[in-house]
């Protein structure tokens, strides 16, 4: 048990593991993937809990996986550096 710490969402766990295995390249979180690949991957995560990331489309565009990670974090209702703790971070 992690106490009050929630589990890491499947989309973040899957994408970060994939990036660690296949995407250790310069600019992996700086460069964007192909928009249609990002959208396809997002839809796959919404339709099924854990899509097959080993498909060629994702292996050939590892930046789409890191882009989905970034999009997920940007769209959180409360940012990773939470509003409640913002003053402590600043």
Image (cartoon, helix red, strand yellow):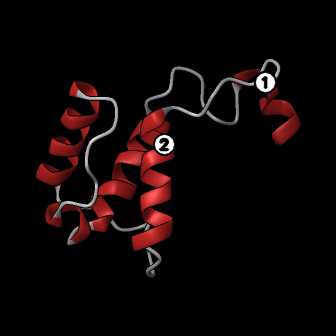
Residue 66 appears at what percent x and percent y?
A: 39, 57
| Residue 29 seen anywhere in this rendered image of the structure | no
Q: Residue at x 26, y 29 (%)?
A: 48
- Tell me: residue 22, above or below residue 81: below
Which label was assigned to residue 1? 1
Instruction: State which quadrant residue 88 falls in.
Output: top right
Q: Residues within 10 Å of mark 1 (few under 14, many from 20)?
A: few
Residue 71 appears at what percent x and percent y?
A: 39, 42
Residue 18 appears at what percent x and percent y?
A: 42, 60
Q: Residue at x 33, y 38 (%)?
A: 50
Left or right position of 14 against 87: left
Q: Is label 1 in contact with label 2 (beta carbons under 8 Å)? A: no
Quarter in which the C terminus is drawn: top right
Q: Name the one closer to the observer, 6 or 72.
A: 6
Q: Name the one closer to the observer, 51 or 32.
A: 51
Q: Residue at x 42, y 51 (%)?
A: 15
Which label was assigned to residue 22? none
- CA gap between label 1 and label 2 equals 19 Å
Q: Nearer the viewer, mark 1 or mark 2?
A: 1
Which label was assigned to residue 12? 2
First in residue order: circle 1 vs circle 2: 1
| Dot 1: element | loop
Left or right position of 19 against 2: left
| Residue 52 seen anywhere in this rendered image of the structure | yes
Q: Residue at x 51, y 32 (%)?
A: 9
Quarter in which the N terminus is drawn: top right
| Dot 2: element | helix
Q: Name the one closer to the observer, 79 or 3.
A: 3
């Amino acid at each position: 048990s992690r106490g009050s710490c929630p589990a890491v969402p499947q989309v973040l766990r899957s994408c970060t593991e994939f990036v660690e295995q296949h995407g250790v390249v310069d600019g992996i979180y700086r460069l964007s993937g192909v928009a249609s690949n990002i959208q396809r991957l997002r839809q796959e995560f919404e339709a099924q809990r854990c899509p097959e990331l080993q498909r060629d489309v994702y292996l050939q565009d590892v930046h789409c996986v890191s882009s989905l990670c970034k999009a997920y974090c940007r769209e959180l209702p409360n940012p990773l550096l939470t509003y409640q703790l913002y003053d402590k971070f600043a």
